[in-house]
Amino acid sequence: MRLSTPFRVFRLVALVLVLVGLLAPLLWMVAASFKTNVDIYDPGKAVVFSPTTANYTTVLKQANYVQFIVNSLWVALASTALSLVLGVPAAYSMARFTMKRSALVVLMARVIPGVSLLVPWYYVFSNLRMVGGYSVLILSHMFVALPLIVYIMMGYFEGLPDELEEAGLVDGLTPIGAFRRITLPLSLPGIATAGILSFIFSWNNFMFALVLSGAQTKTLPVAIFDFVGYASIDWGGLMAASTVVTVPIMVIALFAQKYVVSGLTAGATKG
């Protein structure tokens, strides 16, 4: 069915408007990261200006952002890996044995607002002398990543035919062996999807790290606010730091887009 010319024009205009609305703030952020604070406040230099890398020098050398990047990577990778190790077998059990009540408990953990847990967490972890360490950040990020992984993988496992595992059992595999040798390899797209989404959440998380991190364990979203002072804001440094936080996630999202889409839709049909 061919689309009429007015409709095609309307669709093109709508797509351009959406792209401009989505990309304009990102482009302004990147451009501002190469400006001085004086140029940022000057409307006449919104497009034409003399670029400078001083903001990135401040971020990467003087502000110790390399350490904060390492902190974010460590917390994101550790919380994602541990959540996958715990969440994938849990999702398989809930999907195969129809554990509706357990799934409901996991859903409640996903629905509860994280801000309502910050005060109890801080009280408990401070008494355990864990506040300011990596372990408390990893555990707090797992609280959201684990239910996300469980729900993604439950839909994926429910979409895999039971006959594949039954054939493995007939051939002499144990239930655990059938899961490890048959189901787990087939579920790699779903695992990749869950892992990517969990990593992105952990990398971007601000609220948990703001309350539970220390001076040496700050992650990038928290470290950005070092450029916000009581009397003034270093907009150039702030935009450079924001670019450092945003660009890696955008690159990961662009390259992993097809895997995320395939993993999310793979469990949509059964059989």
Image (spheres, helix red, strand yellow):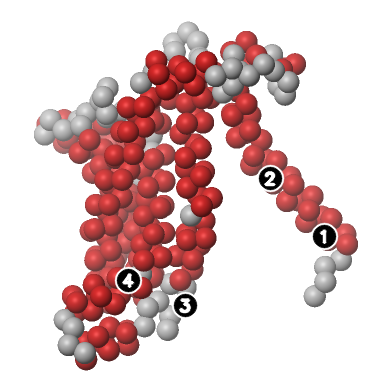
In space, the residues marked 3 and 4 are separated at their CA atoms by: 19 Å
Residues marked 2 and 1 touching at CB (< 8 Å): no
- Position of 177 compared to 142: left or right? left
Residue closer to the observer: 124 or 41? 41
Badge 2: few (under 14), some or many (20 or more) residues near its Cα, within 10 Å?
A: few
Frontmost of labels 2 and 4 is 4
Helix, strand or loop at disc 1? Answer: helix
Numbered mark located on residue 19 in the image: 2
Q: Earlier in the sequence, mark 2 or mark 1?
A: 1
Residue indicated by mark 3: 269
Identify the amino acid type marked 2.
Leu
The residue depicted at 83 percent of the width and 61 percent of the height is 7
Q: Earlier in the sequence, mark 3 or mark 2?
A: 2
Helix, strand or loop at disc 4? Answer: helix
Location of residue 27 (image quadrant): top right
Residue indicated by mark 1: 8
Badge 3: few (under 14), some or many (20 or more) residues near its Cα, within 10 Å?
A: few
Give how far across and how far down residue 201 sits, in percent: 40, 45
Numbered mark located on residue 185 in the image: 4
Identify the amino acid type marked 4.
Pro
Q: Earlier in the sequence, mark 2 or mark 4?
A: 2
Frontmost of labels 4 and 1 is 4
In space, the residues marked 2 and 4 are separated at their CA atoms by: 37 Å
As drawn, the residue found furthest toward the left would be 128
Residue 54 appears in view? yes
Q: Earlier in the sequence, mark 4 or mark 1?
A: 1
In space, the residues marked 2 and 1 are separated at their CA atoms by: 16 Å
Q: Which quarter of the rendering shows the C terminus?
A: bottom left
In space, the residues marked 3 and 2 are separated at their CA atoms by: 32 Å
Q: Earlier in the sequence, mark 3 or mark 1?
A: 1
Q: Is residue 255 above or below residue 161?
A: above
The residue depicted at 43 percent of the width and 72 percent of the height is 267
